[in-house]
Image (cartoon, rainbow, N blue to C red):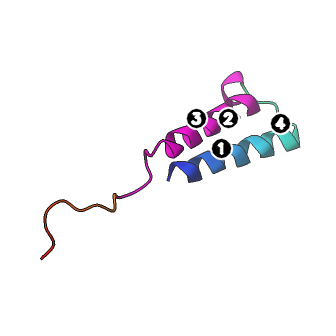
Amino acid sequence: MLAFVAAMCFVIAFVIHATGTSTEAVFSTTSLMLVGLALLAVHSGGVGSGWSSRRRGRRR
């Protein structure tokens, strides 16, 4: 899930950069790309990757 959010941050940053839209400092292309990279790092660390395949307890 976090990888999809990161991809959307990259798309928004690309559109802002490609169109030359001037934005405030908070939503600059660099800050959006850094947020996307942080989200990808968290996703690679295993956070937000979904359910675990291990089940607790014995299977009947």
SS under mark 4: loop
Name which of mark 4 and mark 1 comes first in the sequence.
1
Q: Which amino acid does label 1 sit on?
A: Cys
Prevailing secondary structure of the magenta residues: helix
Disc on res. 37: none
Type of amino acid at the residue the image marks with label 4: Thr
Name the element at disc 1. helix
- Residue designated by label 4: 21
- Answer few, some or many: residues within 10 Å of disc 2's Cα (few below 14, many 20 plus, some between 14 and 19): many
**Distance from the alpha carbon under mark 4 to that under mark 3:** 24 Å
Residue tagged by mark 1?
A: 9
Query: Where is residue 35, by image quadrant?
Result: top right
**How far is the residue under mark 1 from the one under mark 2?**
6 Å
Residue drawn where x is 83% and y is 38% of the image: 17
Q: How far across and how far down the image is residue 37, in percent? A: 63, 37
Q: Indicate whether residue 28 is drawn in magenta.
A: yes
Q: Earlier in the sequence, mark 4 or mark 3?
A: 4
Q: Are the two marked residues, 2 and 3, in contact with CB atoms closer than 8 angstroms?
A: no
What label does residue 38 carry, if any? 3
In the rendered structure, which disc, 1 or 2, sits on the residue that comes first in sequence? 1
Callout 4 touching callout 3 (CB < 8 Å): no
Quadrant location, the C terminus: bottom left
* Quarter residue 40 falls in: top right
Q: Which of 34 and 24 is in front in this view?
A: 34
Q: What's the amino acid at mark 2? A: Leu
Please name the residue shown 34% across and 57% down the image.
52
The answer to whether 24 appears left or right of 50 in the picture is right
Magenta-tinted stretch = 25-51
Lower sequence index among marks 4 and 2:
4
Q: Determine the secondary structure under disc 2.
A: helix
Marker disc for residue 32: 2
